[in-house]
Amino acid sequence: MSVDQGALLAALQSVVDPNTGKDFVTTKQLKNLQVSGGDVSFDVELGYPAKSQIPALRQALIGAARGVPGVGNVSVNVTTKVIAHAVQRGVQLMPSVKNIIAVASGKGGVGKSTTAVNLALALAAEGASVGLLDADIYGPSMPIMMGISGRPESLDGQNMEPMENYGVQVNSIGFLVDPDEAMIWRGPMASQALDQLLKQTNWRDLDYLVVDMPPGTGDIQLSLSQRVPLTGAVIVTTPQDIALADARKGVAMFEKVGVPILGLVENMAVHVCGNCGHVEHIFGAEGGKRYAAEKGIDYLGALPLALSIREQADSGRPSVVADPDGQAATSYKAIARQVAVKVAAKAKDFSSKFPSITISRDT
């Protein structure tokens, strides 16, 4: 009995990507469909890392195919291909870095760095090649949070090799200065140092570079958002009005320079007492959620004010690696998946398709 290819495609179209709500046939992610007698094989290509979801996705596709009369053996190959996406107009992509994601907040103390490091680790856990740049020149925290000490090597005397832990490439001014040294630099010097950290690090074929931005909207933030090819930004805030007032300024800055907001994370949203289980909204309830709805920004999720998250970050083993199946890690992974899916839905970068134009003047 021959297999009706139309019926097969219709059956496969019933399998919906849980992250996008779309099927793989209509979106042309299903490729290389081969039917030989009762044997069926095909590939599915995802635009974002999803290592933890691939087994269930394969089973769903195999089940759908086997429901078609005449189908026997089914072979499904699910892969991920992360491509470079469009950035601000007039800014060139960096070599060896496909997508740069800025994690920002209007003010300090809202858990931006903790969110950035767990976001990077979650993307890496799903199979992506990930880098982490500590752009907080005055208060670098990545050496502690990522459990890395020492100084970067330079093989050519000009560029640095990134440090690495937990499968993530990292660089920070914290690797280059003594821990107790204060960075008493004016804005231009700090911006230049950041530019060197970003562009003179030999990042190795990154799908995503997560940038932990310094708090505020000053020289460094403006320079980075204007000159660095940013695919998008994630805003971190707490529910309280004071934090939200500053988060609004961060959103406004990115909007002015043409960097899309990928979504908002509401940190320290609720505290659950470890002794009695009492739930308390110390910083207010759902202020970030309301602001996201007001601005039309995607609300990526909420994280609790939890002692374990702080302890794990301080010990150099952030939640995603310290307790990968715990509630906090699960939340960070869900946020990371949404960010990656949003990046995958953005327009592809076509700048590499255009020739470089040089103008020479006859003498």
Image: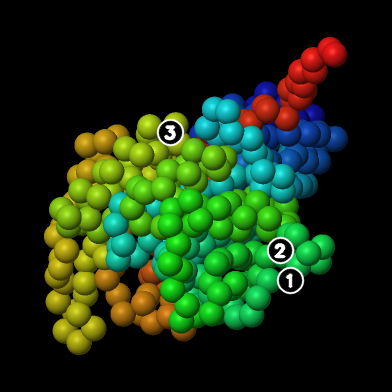
Q: Residues within 10 Å of mark 1 (few under 14, many from 20)?
A: few
For label 2, the SS is loop
* Residue picked out by circle 2: 160
Marks 2 and 3, the one that precedes in the sequence: 2
> Which residue is at the front of the view, 30 or 317?
317
Q: Quadrant of the rendered structure where residue 38 is?
A: top right
* Callout 2 touching callout 3 (CB < 8 Å): no
- Residue at the spot x=45%, y=62% of the render? 185
Q: Residues within 10 Å of mark 3 (few under 14, many from 20)?
A: some
Q: Position of residue 280 (x, y in %)?
A: 14, 70
Indicate left or right for 321 with 74 as reference. Answer: left
* Residue picked out by circle 1: 153
Quadrant where the image shows the N terminus = top right
Marks 2 and 1, the one that precedes in the sequence: 1
> Which residue is at the front of the view, 237 or 161?
161
For label 3, the SS is loop
For label 1, the SS is loop
- Residue at the spot x=72%, y=48% of the render? 96
* Residue picked out by circle 3: 257
Quadrant where the image shows the C terminus = top right
